[in-house]
Image (spheres, rainbow, N blue to C red):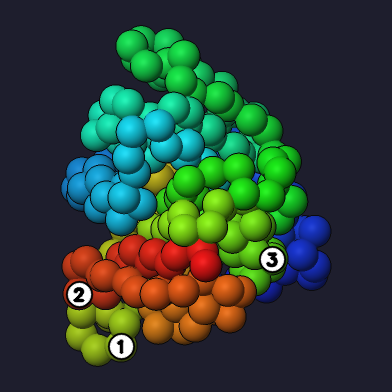
Amino acid sequence: MGQGRIVFESAAEKRRYVRTMFGRIAHRYDLMNRLMTGGQDRRWRRWLVEELQLTAGSRLLDVATGTGDVIFTALGLHTDLELAVGVDFSLPMLVNGRRRAEAMPACHRIVWAAGDTLCLPFPDNSFDAVASAFLLRNVTDLTVALREQHRVTRPGGRVAALDIPRPPDGVWGTLFRFYFHQLVPRLGGLISGQGDAYAYLPRSADAFLRPDQLAEVMESIGLQRVRYRTALSGIVAIHVGVKA
């Protein structure tokens, strides 16, 4: 891997790198998210959950759940969910999520599952809503990942994704790139001891799609009424679509 865009020899190499990398930063993942975003990531996850339009008895799947922030946000807003399932292929992330959940009154409604976003271990039409946060730019096949999320969503249910798209052009994008590429890796190295992991994260955004391009991919796999909202002048985007 060099400077700028990341180059992997194969999809398998990227998958191994991402899995190992998230395992190495799991112990400081939540703290770094708060520090990198000034605490704004909590608000973005709340917006993500609101876009799902959950109701009493809903079944939620959080793909690449990490330590469970989306699930905890959803249960905080909707105490009457039937079930919240968090799936991730990083065991250290899942372990930290389960530890956090032990203190929650609604922990009996949470199921933690090991699984790959490209082959979700659930039957068709299993969930009323599927969410992901900061996942899509890390997958080896974006179309397959979204098709899997579409597959396990019931008809009429929603698929929503929060992520950092390719930074916008102009002065603001330049300033963000400087922050993300120069300051975040130094902070990540100081807090987690894994500066290389936090050097990967901004490069993954540089290699990702713009919000309108991601919306087109979501439409191409069958999601309808796809729309998105951005925050911080396009630095963060939340996309949502409905399964026909």
Q: Position of residue 85 (x, y in %)?
A: 53, 33
Label placed on residue 56: none
Q: Secondary structure at mark 3?
A: helix
**What's under tag 1, amino acid-wise?**
Asp
Q: Secondary structure at mark 2?
A: loop
The residue mark sitting in front, 2 or 1, is: 2
**What's under tag 3, amino acid-wise?**
Val
Mark closer to the chain start, 3 or 1: 3
- Residue at the (20%, 85%) spot, across then down: 171
Q: Secondary structure at mark 1?
A: loop
> Callout 1: few (<14), some (14-19), or many (20+) C-alpha neighbours within 10 Å?
few
- Residue at the (42%, 16%) spot, across then down: 107
Mark closer to the chain start, 3 or 2: 3
**Would residue 16 appear left or right of 231 to someone viewing this image?**
right
The residue mark sitting in front, 3 or 1, is: 3
Q: How far apart, in angstroms, are the residues tagged by discs 3 and 1?
A: 29 Å
Q: Position of residue 180 (x, y in %)?
A: 35, 63
**Among all residues in the image, which is located at the extreme bottom?**
170
- Residue at the (19%, 67%) spot, across then down: 232
Q: Which residue is mark 1?
A: 169
**Would residue 74 appear left or right of 61 to someone viewing this image?**
left
**What's under tag 2, amino acid-wise?**
Ser
Front-most of 133 and 21? Answer: 133
Q: Which residue is mark 3?
A: 144
Label placed on residue 233: 2
Tag 3 near tag 2, CB within 8 Å: no
The residue mark sitting in front, 3 or 2, is: 3
